[in-house]
Structures are given as structure tokens and as C-alpha cells.
Image (tube, coloured by chain):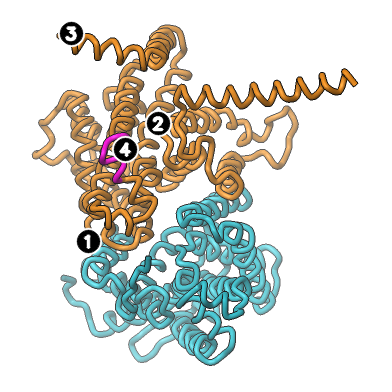
Chain colours: A cyan, B orange
Amino acid sequence: MVVGMTLETFLQQLINGLSIGSLYALIAIGYTMVYGILRLINFAHGDIFMMAAYFTYFGIAVFFLPWYVTFFITIVLTILLGVGIERFAYRPLRDAPKTSLLISAIGVSFLLENLATYLFSGKPQAFPNFPLMTNPINFGSLTVQPVSILIPIVTFFIMIGLLFLINHTKVGMAMRAVSVDYDTAKLMGIKINGVISSTFAIGSGLAAVGAILWCMKYPSVLPLMGVVIGLKCFIAAVIGGIGNVKGAVLGGLILGFSEVLMVAFFPALTGYRDAVAFIILIIILLFLPNGLLGKKQVEKV
Amino acid sequence: MENIQHRFGAYIKIHWKTIVFLGVVLITIGLLDQFVDSYIRRLLNLCAIYTIISLGMNLVNGFTGQFSLGQAGFMAVGAYTVAIFTVPIEARATIFYLAPMTPLLANIQLPFIVALLLGGLVSAGFAFLIGGPCLRLRGDYLAIATLGFSEIIRIVFTNTQTITNGALGIKSIPTITSLWWTYGIAIIIIVLMILLINSSYGRAFKSIREDEIAAEAMGVGLFKTKMTSFMIGAFFTGIGGGLFAALLGTVDPKQFYFTLTYNFLLIIVLGGLGSISGTVIASFVVTLGQEWLRFLDEPMAFGLDLPIFRPGLRMVVFSALLMVVVLFYRKGLMGTNELTWDFIGKKIKVIKSKFNRKKSASQGGDNK
């Protein structure tokens, strides 16, 4: 136990956990939506996030574009990347065995990592500071970076928007239909490819937003940054119940809080920070295999 | 007695080609061991080790249809076990100079072969622990859990200073100097794999790959069978990792980054998921190919300063190869076939008949 942890530091850690948890949530939504529809762990999602971080880095630090132009270009390029990956690496394998699809996803992830290492070099690049976002401000005795407050707010509004999209629009209804029963949805005249493409577009767009916010909070980009973040966010999606958007957000927050609080309470275990997610995964799989908000899945013959 | 003799004679009669082939392989290894330099020897050793590890992976991913990505982690366990138990006791004080080795292990030194087997067993033990929660559920969680395991084991080995010497790694492990160790063990494991795949266990593995529900209905215990396959696969990988440590003479956590697993994935996909001979061939192709393509990483590859040749290009080529194989040649080199004498005979016949048809067609054309 840490001696002398004050209420302020505890609150500060909570805000920290909230902001990193929200970032996890943004990326986890991409995993959960793709899994819900294709039953595929999109291994490339973490690397799509990494590419988005590089797009932002290039826009701001190399081409000196204004931030709003950069953010717009980043989101557009990332969406194109995500949809393109689906089109060229996953769609040809629609009728192939599941294993081939999974290997293809790993192949894309491996290719993106190596391409990034090759094109942008393996060295971490420093991301420029956003004084407006990173200069700490004081709330009484609390000092907080504005970006740490911005992240949960952005995540909250995105989740509201996404839930509206899924529950109250035609595309959303089609998505739900495909995720319940792929073949029947096809027979009902739903354009499966369009639905899947829009799912990848939404997931990649959120990964881009996540990457932009991530770079403001942790100003460094490197080719392998997406791997561990990607794994953790998939685990966040499993914790919440895979296929469920609210679950992904909940899982992301739980993961963020557990990590931050473990490091705060047991500083000796700081080296094991990245292991927390996997320990939670094992516990969840043992006791709640469908996640916190997931429905029980029955496999049909 | 006569019966045994008779059976022995029949065995020779059926398998004489294989026996001759094995003899040729052994003589080749013996000759190579005498005449090649240390660079080629190291490369050939690496081929054999990659064969062992890829076979372990193919058993789980190819034959049983469970998707495991923990190869780097299981390798690390085997490698560290060999490292910890075979480093000479006198050398330990200088290796563990930051923090001395824990007294529980500091005075234990085992013969290489015992440490190697122990490494395989410890690896299988870890497989048991991970398999428990994952193999009962949908298969794809195993991929994440095993990938996570190989990351965690790296983190653990980096942090346990008194056992693994942390990030510094363990140096001066007694090295193996002949090809006999690696190739001997590789041949034993290939034979074990063939026996296993053709046994009732092997048929149970394949039935799970084809259809879990049907397999269960036929009385195959899903969890137990998957666990058996997963643990045997981890055992082979641990052995491979142990040989890897003894080949390099040094281990540190950075060697076992999870991207190493993708190497083996490429091997088994290229060779064919569910083919022993395909895995062996692909291990050699990929290992030698990666060495041969090193020029891609060098800026002055063709005597010109071409900007496209710089570090990283080689791995881009290899990951692109993995994508091409998955998308266009999903069956790999061998599919689920084996390179048996019958298979070769059939292929030769097909080629011959094609050749003859062409010949007769062209002759027919000439006559008119």
C-alpha cells in the first residue's frame, strides 16, 4: 500500500483512468462491431490505429497543416484504409474457412507493422505539443490536462451517436440483422457488402479519433504502438461482451481504471502494467465467458 | 520367431524407399557436419529448429484447427529453462552481476538433454494453464490469450531479475556444435508426429478440425483432445526453444518478441495447414529465404544507391508473401497432403501423361 495517498492524488488517478479507459473504449468499439458482424478478430485494427497516428503526425509535424485540416484528412484516410483492408483482404475470403480469415487479418497486421517500420523507420517520433490541450489547469488542488477531460466527453458523445445510428437508422437496423443471422439477412435483401463496409468505416473512423486523442495525451508515435493497445482493446470488448457497443465502452473503462489504480496502489508492480488486461481476460473467460453485457451464444449445427 | 522375421521382412519391403531416404539424409548430415563452415552450420541448425517449432504449431493450428499464437512464448519458456539449468555454476556470479541468482536455483546444473526435456515439460505445463480457460470457449479467444501469454511471459522474464537476469539475459550457455543434436531431435519429432497423426488421437484431432459438433457426437471428448494437442504442440515448441538457446548461447527477452510467432505462422501456412512434409519443406524455404533476401535490407544492394533498399524491406516482402499465400494459394505448398512415395509417383504420372499428350498432339499435327 502506498503511504500517504491523498484524496487529491486518488481523484487525479481516477481522472487518468477515465481518460485512458475512454481511449480504450473508442478502439474497442471497432473490434466489437466487426466481431459482431463477421465473427472475426480484426487483428489489423490496432495497426489501423497506428497508421492513423502516423497520418496525424505527418499532417501536423511534417506538412504543417492546420490541426482541423489534419484531423479531417486523418479520419478520411483511416476510413479508406479500413474499408480497403476489408475489400482486398477479407472479402475474397468470405466463404473460406474461419482460419484463413484469421490468418489474413494477422497478415494485414504484420504487413502494416512492417510497412510502417520500413517507411517511417522503427524509431519513435515525437508528436508536437498542443499547448491548449496539454498545459495543465487547476481545479482547486487538482491539476488536470484539458485533454484528459476532453477524451471522456468525446467518447460519450460518440457512443450516444453510435447507439442512435444502430438503433434508429436503416443502416443500423441492417447491421443488427446481419449480426443476428448473416444468411437470413442476405435473403431479406440486405446488401451485406455495404453493411460490412460501413461497419469497417465506422470502426476505422473511431480508431482515427482515438489515435488523434491518444497522440495529444501520449505524444509519441512508433510502428508497433498499435499491437499492445489493440490486444488490450480487444480484451476490453470481451470484458463488456463482444458484439455490444455499450459493453465495449464499459470494458474499456474497467480496463483503464484497473490499470491506473493498480499502478497507483502497487507501484512495485508497474512493470506488469500491460499484464493486467490479460489477467482480467482469463478471469472473465473463466467466470463470465459472455462478458458483462453479452448475450449467451448458442452454436447451431 | 518366424512370424517376427516375416513381419520384419514385410516392413522392409513396404518401407525400403523411406529407409534408403533416411540413410541418405543421415549420411548428408554427417558429411555436412564435417565440411561446412560455422555460418552454414548455424543456418542449417536454425532450419531444423524452425522445423521442430513449426511442427508443434501445425499440430495445433493445422491438424486440430485451434488457433494458437503463443509460439514465441513457449519457445521463451523452453529457452530459459535450458539457459538457467545448463549455465556453468562458476559463470553464474559474473552473469548475474546486478542481482545474484536465487539460492533455490543457483547450485543446480543439469545435463543438456535433461534440461531440454524439462523445458518442453514446463512449456506444456504453461499450455495446460492457458488452455484451461480458453479451450472450452469459442476457438478465436485462444488466439488472443496465447498472443497475450507470449507478451506476458516476456514481461515476466524481464522483471524476474534473480531467476532470468531480467533484460540483460543469460549469456555463456554451453552451445551445441554439431548438426546431430538438432537434426537428430528434428527427425525424432517428425517420426513422433507421423505416428501421432496416424493414431486414434490424430484422427480425433482432425475430426475436431473438420466439425466440432460431429466429432463430439461421435464420442470425441472435445476439451480433453484439444488440450492434448495444445500441450504436445507446446512441448515440441519448448524443445525447439531449448535448442535455440543452446544454438545461440545467449537468451534475452527481446529475442522472443511476438513477431517471431508470425515467422512460424508463415511457415505453416506456406507449407500447408495440416501437412507434416509441407511444414518441413517450408521451414527450410523460409529460413534460407530470409537469409538469402538479406540484400534487400542493404542500401547498396546492386552497387547503386537505390532508396528503396533499406532496413525493413525484407520483412515487408515476407509479410506480403503471407498475404499472397492466404489470399491466392490458400492450401499452401502441400495442402493437407503428405509427400509420400505414392504422392510423388502420382505427380510424376500426371506430369508424364501431360507431356505425352503434348507430344502426341504435336505429332498428330505433323502427320497432317
Amino acid type shown at disc 1: Ala
What residue would you read off at disc 4? B237
Q: Which residues are magenta?
A: B198-204
Q: Are dots 4 and 3 on a single chain? A: yes
Calculate the distance from the C-alpha at mark 2 to the C-alpha at mark 4: 10 Å
**Callout 3 crowding tier (Cα within 10 Å): few <14, some 14–19, many ≥20:** few
Q: Quadrant of the C terminus of chain B?
A: top right
User: In this rendering, is residue B111 above or below A153?
Assistant: above
**Callout 2 crowding tier (Cα within 10 Å): few <14, some 14–19, many ≥20:** many
Q: Are marks 1 and 3 in contact (CB under 8 Å)?
A: no
Count of picture labels: 4
Residue A249: mark: none
Q: Are dots 2 and 4 on a single chain? A: yes
Calculate the distance from the C-alpha at mark 1 to the C-alpha at mark 3: 72 Å
Q: Earlier in the sequence, mark 2 or mark 3?
A: 3
Amino acid type shown at disc 4: Thr
What residue would you read off at disc 2? B51
Calculate the distance from the C-alpha at mark 2 to the C-alpha at mark 3: 40 Å
Q: Earlier in the sequence, mark 2 or mark 4?
A: 2
What residue would you read off at disc 1? A268
Residue at position x 24%, y 10% from top?
Answer: B6
Q: Secondary structure at mark 3?
A: helix
Q: Are dots 1 and 3 on a single chain? A: no
* Label 4: chain letter: B
Between B196 and B59, which is closer to the camera in this rendering? B196
What residue would you read off at disc 3? B2
Amino acid type shown at disc 3: Glu
